[in-house]
Image (cartoon, helix red, strand yellow):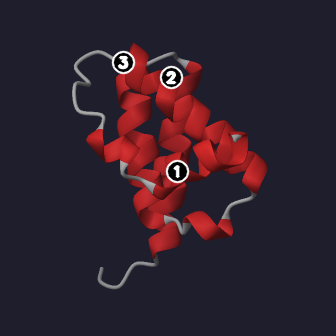
Amino acid sequence: MTDIDPSVYASYHWFSSQYHKSRQEFAQFYKSALLYLAYMSVESLSDTFKLDFAFDLSLSALLGDNIYNFGELLAHPIVRIFFHLNS
């Protein structure tokens, strides 16, 4: 299959991230959540969702095993929005 809509990938990674979050598998949540954001436009998400999701991503980056590079998270627009909303 070619030309699959990005929303299909976004939905898959969203559900994967929520599954790992419910099982407290922080590293897997972190990876799935970043993949979800790769297929979603941050501007299309509500401010409340962005704030909650950035918080969850930050915690999972701290709690997850073998996550040593926070540059990918810090460079993402959702984290900049997180700090902008809280200031």
SS class, disc 1: helix
Q: Name the amino acid type tagged 2.
A: Leu
Q: Which image quadrant for residue 28?
A: top left
The reply to whether residue 20 is in sight is no
The residue singled out by tag 3 in the image is: 64
In the shown orientation, is residue 85 left or right of residue 81?
right
Identify the residue shown where x is 41% and y is 42%.
32
Question: Which of the two marks, 1 or 2, is nearer to us in this view?
Answer: 1
Question: Circle 1: is it few (<14), some (14-19), or many (20+) Cα within 10 Å?
Answer: few
Label of residue 59 in the image: 2
Question: How far apart, in angstroms, are the residues tagged by discs 3 and 2?
Answer: 8 Å
Residue 61 x, y percent position in the rendering: 39, 26
SS class, disc 2: helix
* Image quarter (top left, top right, bottom left or bottom right) of the N terminus: bottom left
The residue singled out by tag 1 in the image is: 80
Q: Name the amino acid type tagged 3.
A: Gly
SS class, disc 3: loop
Q: Is residue 69 above or below residue 63?
A: below
